[in-house]
């Protein structure tokens, strides 16, 4: 298994919370050379991952310059992994497409001028694209045909793809009693079944892997294993792992973790206790539970730091946590304020993960001495 492979994980505008699932899955299998990025213009990695979120907001942030650098990264030997929104971003499924990557030609089975009538979760059902509509017939668990057997994975807005321009590695086979139908079952079957759920294409010296479902979801261990198997066969080009932060131990370490935990806990409680707000950020609808997910993730990471005698830290992190908690308590119905907080939470969470991985690396180096 090639744990040395360097993974650039996009967490900027357009990315939702599902990148956390990927980080936790990678960590479980020992892949910890992860570089969290918001700037696409300098990708120093073997793999670039763009996961779930909003492809419209993604492009509004990276613009055509970012598209150029992603294409360059792939052509020079990098591997692009798109999941859900990251897959839409790479596909050319319209004669007059938005200026996204457009590297895999095909059609979307869930793109229509007249989608089936919606029966549930209307805010999750459609997104306008040019003169048509991308619609999402189901959510939650689906069954794929993969490597000659059935494999379960969750779907949260990912595409059904029909393409002669790439190799299909998995197709949607059937639904289960855990599938949530947003249109009538027959319409969902006609739309999604037997279309590609995972495909790959060579491009220059590199390649693309496009996932509709979330193989990285923490509740789907078999799908996790298949994703890790794919990643483990991607060659490393020798990018070193980096250690961030400064060493802290003793009473200083205990004060630091106590202060950090205090404010993360305050933000977490504020998010869980919020009114039933919904904010439209880009083309996606967010709720307090989504923001709470970041605080909850950080709260769980703090438990690791509490258990270690020596950790790596950045001294500004507790103050940042305090600012996030205060903002969370004051947050109301303004979507602009919610978007600002979302971006800060993503950055804060990624910084804490980087310190977590750096502390692990420091411990491993100490054990070798």
Image (cartoon, rainbow, N blue to C red):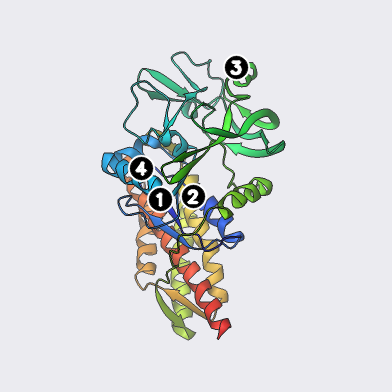
Which residue is label 4 attached to? 71
Residue drawn at x 28%, y 40% is 63
Q: Does residue 311 sit above or below 334 in this rendering?
A: below
Q: Is residue 296 visible?
A: yes
The Cα atoms of the two marked residues, 3 and 2, are separated by: 30 Å
Identify the disc placed on residue 19: 2
- Residue at far front of view: 205
Q: Earlier in the sequence, mark 3 or mark 1?
A: 1
The Cα atoms of the two marked residues, 3 and 4, are separated by: 36 Å
Q: Quadrant of residue 153?
A: top right
Q: Position of residue 318 (x, y in %)?
A: 39, 68
Residue drawn at x 57%, y 60% is 2
Q: Earlier in the sequence, mark 3 or mark 4?
A: 4
Q: Does residue 24 sit above or below 256 in this rendering?
A: above
Which residue is label 1 attached to? 11
Residue drawn at x 51%, y 52% is 20
Which corner quadrant holds the C terminus?
Answer: bottom right
| Residues marked 1 and 4 touching at CB (< 8 Å) | no
Identify the disc placed on residue 187: 3
The Cα atoms of the two marked residues, 3 and 1, are separated by: 34 Å
The Cα atoms of the two marked residues, 1 and 4, are separated by: 18 Å
Which corner quadrant holds the N terminus?
Answer: bottom right
């Amino acid at each position: 298994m090639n744990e040395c492979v360097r993974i650039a994980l996009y967490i900027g505008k357009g990315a939702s919370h599902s990148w956390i699932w990927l980080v936790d899955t990678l960590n479980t299998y020992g892949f910890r050379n992860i570089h969290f990025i918001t700037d696409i213009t300098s990708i120093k990695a073997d793999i670039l991952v763009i996961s779930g979120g909003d492809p419209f907001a993604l492009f509004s942030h990276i613009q055509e310059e970012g598209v150029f650098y992603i294409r360059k990264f792939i052509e020079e030997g990098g591997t692009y992994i798109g999941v859900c929104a990251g897959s839409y971003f790479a596909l050319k499924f319209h004669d007059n497409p938005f200026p996204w990557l457009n590297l895999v030609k095909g059609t979307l089975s869930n793109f229509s001028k007249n989608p089936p009538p919606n029966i549930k979760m209307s805010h999750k059902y459609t997104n306008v694209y040019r003169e048509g509509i991308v619609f999402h017939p189901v959510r939650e668990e689906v069954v794929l045909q993969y490597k000659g057997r059935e494999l379960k994975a969750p779907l949260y807005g990912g595409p059904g793809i029909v393409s002669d321009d790439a190799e299909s590695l998995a197709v949607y086979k059937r639904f289960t009693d855990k599938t949530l139908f947003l249109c009538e079952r027959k319409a969902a079957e006609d739309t999604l079944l037997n279309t590609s759920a995972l495909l790959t294409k060579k491009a220059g010296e590199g390649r693309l892997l496009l996932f509709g479902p979330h193989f990285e979801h923490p509740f789907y261990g078999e799908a996790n294993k298949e994703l890790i198997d794919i990643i483990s066969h991607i060659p490393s080009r020798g990018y070193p792992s980096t250690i961030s932060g400064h060493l802290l131990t003793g009473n200083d370490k205990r004060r630091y973790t106590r202060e950090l935990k205090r404010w993360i806990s305050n933000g977490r409680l504020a998010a869980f206790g919020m009114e039933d707000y919904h904010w439209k950020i880009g083309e996606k609808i967010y709720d307090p539970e989504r923001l709470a997910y970041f605080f909850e993730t950080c709260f769980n990471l703090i438990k690791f730091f509490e258990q270690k005698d020596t950790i790596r830290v950045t001294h500004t992190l507790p103050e940042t946590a305090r600012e996030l908690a205060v903002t969370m308590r004051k947050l109301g119905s303004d979507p602009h304020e919610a978007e600002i907080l979302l971006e800060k939470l993503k950055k804060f969470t990624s910084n804490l993960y980087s310190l977590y991985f750096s502390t692990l690396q420091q411990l491993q180096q100490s054990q070798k001495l």
